Amino acid sequence: MKRTHTCGELRRENANQTVTLSGWVNSCRDLGGLTFIDLRDREGVTQVVINPESVSEEIAKLASTIRDEFVLTVIGKVIARPDNMVNKNMATGAIELEVIDVVIDNRSKPMPFHLNDPNVNEDLRLKYRYLDIRGSQTNENLRIRHQITMMVRNSLSDQGFIEVETPILSKSTPEGARDYLVPSRVHPNNFYALPQAPQQYKQLLMVGGIERYFQIAKCFRDEDLRADRQPEFTQIDIEASFVDQEDLYSIIEKMLYDIMLKVKGLEISLPFPRMTHAEAMDRFGSDKPDTRFGMEFVNLADVLANCEFKVFSGALSTGGQVKCINAKGLAKSSSRKIIDQWTDFVKQFGAKGLAWIKIEEDGNVKSPIAKFLSEDELNGVISAASAEAGDVILVVADKASIVADALGRLRLEIAENNDMIPADVYNFLWCVDFPLLDHDEETDTWHAVHHPFTSPYPEDIEKMDTDPANVRARAYDVILNGCELGGGSIRIHQPEMQEKMFKALGITDEEIQEKFGHIVDALSFGAPPHGGIALGLDRLVMLLTGADSIREVIAFPKTNKAACLMTESPSGVDAEQLEELHLALVKLEEK
Amino acid sequence: MKRTHTCGELRRENANQTVTLSGWVNSCRDLGGLTFIDLRDREGVTQVVINPESVSEEIAKLASTIRDEFVLTVIGKVIARPDNMVNKNMATGAIELEVIDVVIDNRSKPMPFHLNDPNVNEDLRLKYRYLDIRGSQTNENLRIRHQITMMVRNSLSDQGFIEVETPILSKSTPEGARDYLVPSRVHPNNFYALPQAPQQYKQLLMVGGIERYFQIAKCFRDEDLRADRQPEFTQIDIEASFVDQEDLYSIIEKMLYDIMLKVKGLEISLPFPRMTHAEAMDRFGSDKPDTRFGMEFVNLADVLANCEFKVFSGALSTGGQVKCINAKGLAKSSSRKIIDQWTDFVKQFGAKGLAWIKIEEDGNVKSPIAKFLSEDELNGVISAASAEAGDVILVVADKASIVADALGRLRLEIAENNDMIPADVYNFLWCVDFPLLDHDEETDTWHAVHHPFTSPYPEDIEKMDTDPANVRARAYDVILNGCELGGGSIRIHQPEMQEKMFKALGITDEEIQEKFGHIVDALSFGAPPHGGIALGLDRLVMLLTGADSIREVIAFPKTNKAACLMTESPSGVDAEQLEELHLALVKLEEK
């Protein structure tokens, strides 16, 4: 008995055929002596009817033992339903199956939770992840993930890229997050590391003349997990030779176009808009601006140039900023309580306070700071913010980084809470020309904003010694709806430039040799000009499925404590295993 | 200056066009004042000519500094060569490029070895793997690997399979080889393990209703590496629900058909032949028979039933075998020395000796055992072996396992050394009906031949208690030219049967709960009938590229000592890293 059709396949045209279906009992009801079963497989649900009078006594008896989630194979005759009995909510609603024979392939204990119940505790779902996957949403998420990865592979392969697998048993990298280590038994007291990204390997593949590489690559970071991180995650990793930024933009745009068309049925417009890092920070206070709605920053420096209000003049005179957003139409709903909440909100990001100016429906201006501003200044702010009756202007004055962060996040918070973000809009953009170096005030050292292999603009190289803060990197991020989908850069391909970069980062010759020796070596054997990008696959799938978390689009995710509740991993190991690895445990109490 | 064409693209039709190429200097010669450069990229080689009289003085000077493996971008005019000057060995041999401008994108130190030199020491190649990849053979191997994985994915996706990523940070499994462990920092003294295969996850996906799963999956085994193993390797991992063996055979056959057509241009014939494990052992002494040539085993039990020669009669009377192969046409070349070598060869595999019967060109029979056999027996052996003038019959008498191993390997050894294996023949076959259980004489316990989740034939289940050696598994291997490409089985899907199997393997209830608890649990929640297979991708690519070793088809392989010579991994780590992991090293001298 082998299935002839799936449970999503039968239509009125199949009437009177004898078919075999296999699947799970989605529901089972006894009505007037007849047993009605909704039989479910991956493709759909078909209603199956067992009439005890038209099957053998044995089968009738068996049918009475059937419960939810039993696995059945049924042979039956397809019966067309009368027009007025068609179930329009089911693809197979025009027919039902009159059972001739049934085999119970497997029984099931009662479920620990109801499949598809949206209110199940996540820990319980993760413990029984195999049942959670049986529910329609997780199953569908994994199918869409497969579709997306197939599109990525086919699009890149069509564009001349080849997928190359790089090692998982890799070498500990000095940059970035904490590595997961793997002790070596054959080389006692030595360790492999799981790769945080295949960055060095992909550059070495360029030195190896592969020219166009990609990989859907597993990456690992041993972090104290924030809300939506996983210890292992997947990235779409890309590198190409003899290319500049424009080539990479168009490769990625083509790939994302293909994906959006296939997965969402949407033709997105190409090329994506570009925004420099400086502009993004200026207009949105973020290097991943969400452009699905307005409420952009308005710089009040000119309007308030001569302002006598200390909060503003103080910020401006010490090199800081005074900026506002206009929360359109929210004057009425922004009660004292709401404004207090917003004020507390911006304080989390370092702002000392939030000034506001309401233009009430009748045109009256209400603001605790009105008394500190001249009429010209007040009108200037209102005019600069294009504020009208019903709007509320929110002002932050502080050093630039705090204004950006506080006001940028407030903008998102207000938009989300007031349904200002249109649904089903997918705004892609490139954020470009990131700074190359970032100053760490605490240690007075310079860090690579992207990574130490990122190339500066040739015309900015001379500033590396004199004005490092203003050296622009040939680095770019691709943004979707305010989320960073990925980022990359044109790399340094000449050994002299790479050494200059390491010097700028304060890395000693000895460290260079120990940590990056093979990379510097490789650059000196005819490395071609090259660049690349990496996109977070989990996040892309999450955004395109509308899932709340990347855990929803990963088959067997870990918790925020990096544990698998299903297999109870990580777990203890035998003393012999440790002995073979020349390792001893340091017990917690010994510390 | 960005390339307009690849180095493999220009033809006579392009004559007089101005084009830009980028690539590596494959060779550089100065002839009569002209500089001739073979410029190479991934797609091919183009001859480039720099005439100092037709370029600026600056460029002429630059040209004189060019050396092998420099990276250049050249602008030039395509010149058609006269018919009698066409280089037929190069796809671009009908043209050359007359240089207008050159940029040296990067210089190169002298190479540590000559690209494409077949005699370079492998350790040196692995240290500079990025240069080894630049050589044409490794580059081509990686391209073919990509083609094969794309074919696998597209074929399986077309057949309704979805690729699901299973975790790399996994749980230590009690069966099989040694695990690689990953210490957890967040859960001190606990460990993840890298998966030896996604076996349990793929079965759980079936319980989850995925129905058709595949994955090109990284697997890990911490073994003392034999000749051609790697600590990490890649398998094509497949599992499907509501299927039997026949369904899986046809899925795999279709996939391999697609690959052979695309990669080798060959239409292989389907379905593949099937051979039971018993027949394969009987005819070839191997469960992975190489059927590209004959020399099959001939069982001499009947012919020698009453033989008085102790070596033969002793083997037969104690339940052993007497079998021979006929090395056709080798009577003349099989000198005493050769026969001694063969004898030594079979002794490695436990045989006590090798009997031989030569039929010389003139029909004379020469054999040291002739005197122990009656004339009927001698003629009987010759006739059974279908031996003619010029052949040599080689006989092994021993217990069945030794006869199989010794004579089976001798068969391969002789065929390889005497060019008996036809080139470009791809013989696929299914070896089926493996035994379920294998008896370990030392410990007097039974082991799973495949793994403990493999289903027995229903009709053999009752023998599990009474005659375990003769229970057949629903297990199968796919063989190509005597190599095992992969193997799989129909799994146990009912919890009662799984427990029966664990009992047969002597696994206690406590161990079941601890090690397999989540699997047994999962089976009890409506697991569908399912089965699967896993194929070694590295080996498949090796066979289809004709490479000598899987290291040749892996971008960054490890040595037989599990080390990466390029990155010098594994390596020592900082004391702080170990402290965070609550681990201490046990120094070698302390042991």
Image (spheres, coloured by chain):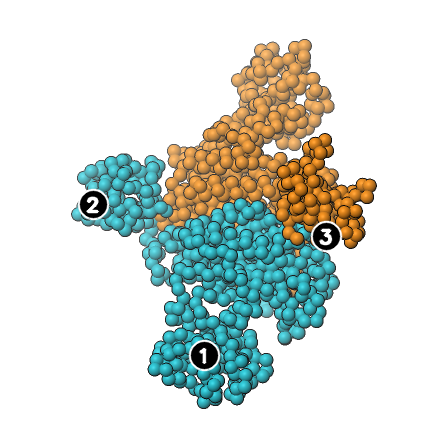
Chain colours: A cyan, B orange
Are the two marked residues, 3 and 1, in contact with CB atoms closer than 8 angstroms? no
Q: Answer left or right for A247 relative to A151.
A: right
Residue under mark 3: which chain is it in?
B
Identify the residue position indicated by label 3 in the image. B104
Q: Same chain for labels 1 and 2? Say yes or no.
A: yes
Q: How far apart are marks 1 and 2 (CA)?
A: 64 Å
Q: How far apart are marks 3 and 1 (CA)?
A: 56 Å
A85 and A591: which is toward the camera = A85
Residue name at image x 65 percent, y 10 percent: B363
Using the image, determine if residue A302 lies above or below residue A169.
below
Are the two marked residues, 1 and 2, in contact with CB atoms closer than 8 angstroms? no
Q: Answer left or right for A559 relative to B324.
A: left
Residue name at image x 57 percent, y 46 percent: A160
Q: Same chain for labels 3 and 1? Say yes or no.
A: no
Residue B2 at x, y percent in the picture: 64, 52
> Which image quadrant is residue A416 in?
bottom left
Identify the residue position indicated by label 1 in the image. A383
Using the image, determine if residue B352 lies above or below residue B102.
above
Residue name at image x 72 percent, y 46 percent: B99
